[in-house]
Amino acid sequence: MSKTILLAGNPNVGKSSLFNLLTGLKQHTGNYEGVTVEKKTGRYQDYSIIDLPGLKSLWAATIDEQISARAILQGKDTSQPIIFVVSGTKLEEELLLFTQIADLQIPMILVINFKDELAANNITIDTDLLSGRLNCPVLLCNSRNGDGLEDIKEIIHNNNFAIPTAFARSHYDDFSSGNYGNAYEPLVRAWVGDPADTKPDLAIRDLEKRYLVIGQLLTDTMEIPALVEQQERSDRLDKILLHPFFGTLIFLAILFVIFQSIFSFTAYPMDLIDGTFAWISGKASNIQPTWLGDLLSNGLIPGLGGILIFIPQIAILFFFFGLLESTGYMTRISFLSDNVLKRFGLSGSSVVPIVSGLACAIPAIMSVRTVERERERLALIMAIPFMTCSARLPVYTILIALIFPDEYLFGIFSYKGLALFALYLLGTFSTLGAAWLISRWKEPSADPIWIMEMPLYRSPHWRRVFSDMFIKTKSFVVGAGKIILLFSLILWFLSAFSPHDQDFIDQKAAQQTEVDASSVALEYSYAGYIGKTIEPIIAPLGYDWKIGIALLSSFAAREIFVGTLATIYSIGSEEEGSVITRLKSEVKPGTNLPRFDIATCFSLLLFYAFALQCMSTVAIVRRETGSWKWPLIQFGAMLLVAYISALAGYQLLS
Amino acid sequence: MISLNMLKKGTLARVELLPSDAEARQLLLTHGIHPGKRIRLLQSFPSQDLSLITCNGRKLAIRRADMASIQVEPMNE
């Protein structure tokens, strides 16, 4: 069995860049046992290297931190070596965690990253002296250009990790209270146990004590010029980028560029994917036996296409998030938004999950783990599914096209564009409203301290940006894809099979000459019967049994709606133009009134804006909250809001 | 000794007392703010109710309301 090495350290110390340098493309992502926290594992020679989520101390505050802390503590018994990464300009806080791990007596090396910034800030570190005092190899490196990487490889190759000096064992003896006489063991027990059972006092005493030790250590080994804290370039940029007016304006401009890119640059690749799958599907329909051709062309291939079509949008979104993160701008967005978000029981830390919700609720809910306050985490998990995710987009596009003209207000603003913008606003305000309600309900009075580090601005690390984009997109496609594919197959089965024999269906088709045979087959299929069963419940919203089937099938994933409508209304192609033409020509039985009139479309838009039609989201919420209680409350509440709004919308407009 | 939110822009100060609330105190400690540390108020953004401070070369954003619970002693440079 190959040996495992952990890469540990505080957030933003260049750990992942170092991981990429060491492992190249020999890496894969999975999940830590029982949770959805991403586990990045790579190979270097015979070693398996795990890139742990960043943490500041073994007194873990966030879920990500608890995962890292647990991984480190589990490695204690097997002496799993650790490459501990720090950024040279913030050694004091970052060595805090180092001293805690040292107390566990795990073999380590200390890598001081960003050596170029040490030079730029005139900071000198006596690495030999530091290494001697820590009793552990200390190396300088720069993960941005690989400088110093060979030294790290050599240590790994020669297995020159060393067990550092234990800090608590030698420095806790002078606690005079008597409660901490043998402080080391209670500390380890507290770290290994449930953080909720830990007395805060123990954590505070531990942290304060360690700072004294580290302070003395650094005084002896490091020279920092008096004014190093004035990071002038970052400060100059912050004067503009954090300015209440100009900073907000720049932020809005950046958001505008991101959304323009998501909707403009992706049109061609999305059409290409769509066209390719339509072509493959057409070819597959000729495969014999007929049932196999039908399964492939109407079930499996469209299902697969329905997942892969979102790759361009998701990839572009992850690219921009990676870029904003790697330049240090993401935290500035948090700064700019804090004042608004705190009115809804949230904080600036909520910005990343909320904005991510525009792409997909699944990675957005996963990113909530980095938020420190539990109340805020729950509010976000419950509220984020209201955000207008990319899966709502195809549904909105079709419904808007059915009721809004291709005209411009004042010759500039497209009515369709304004309608879409209004739906995005509705999604955002619903999210904030839901977050407010949850945070008031959960804990009405508590509002703990909020503090956030503003890292230095850095030029983007392109390799990391692209590698993260690739890994996260792949993870999304594989994760969400499985469930979409499964439901596509179930829907195909329910639509393709009937409790009646073929003669019965042929007879019915002969009686109903005004509709084509495939529509009749659908009506008497299992799906048709399900649609008719729920018709009395959905009729007050303006829907018939056919819309009912599309509605039900899209509870698996809302983007299935368009494909289902295409199938139900017997359209050979899923290309939007033809769907719209056919839907526009549909009339209500026995009348000449359009089936998809303004009232029905508004009702559908409201239903899709509020309902939680995404089984993957339900599954993620279950895993992140650790119980079925919250996803069930969320599903029920969102369904209720969706039903009432759709009912009100239809009844008012019809 | 004054509250951190009373500190003038650009002034250096020494942290004297942290809030008594254990959760807040632990959070500040993990961000490197503890008694004896030197802290500087970089900029205030009253309309956003936020301030930027530096401590140990780290730039930190903190709400002005939360700053009131940290006691500091202004220092001469």
Image (cartoon, coloured by chain):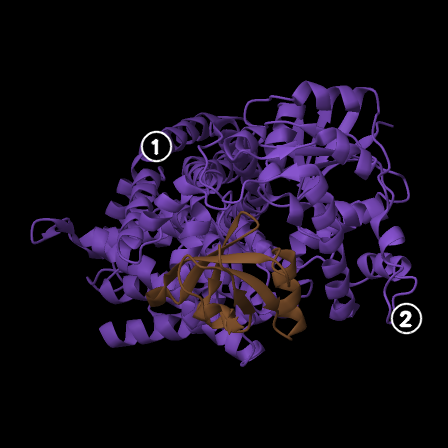
Amino acid type at mark 1? Asp
Q: The numbered mark 1 sits on a residue in which chain?
A: A
2 vs 1, front mark: 2
Does any portion of residue A598 appear in the rendered image?
Answer: yes
Q: Between A406 and A158, which is closer to the camera in this rendering?
A: A158
Residue A70 image offset from top left, x and y in percent: 78, 51
Whether A272 is drawn above or below A526: the answer is above
Q: Between A528 and A492, which is closer to the camera in this rendering?
A: A492
Does any portion of residue A540 appear in the rendered image?
Answer: no
What residue is drawn where x is 7% and y is 54%?
A: A410
Please state, as top left, top right, bottom left or bottom right, where the N terminus of chain A lies in the image: top right
Q: Which residue is mark 1?
A: A271
What residue is drawn where x is 21% and y is 57%?
A: A403
SS at mark 1 in the image: helix
Whether A45 is drawn above or below A91: the answer is above
Instruction: Residue at the far left: name it.
Output: A410
The number of discs equals 2
Give me the disc on residue A178. Answer: 2
Residue A378 image offset from top left, x and y in percent: 57, 66
Q: The numbered mark 2 sits on a residue in which chain?
A: A
Labels 2, 1: one chain: yes
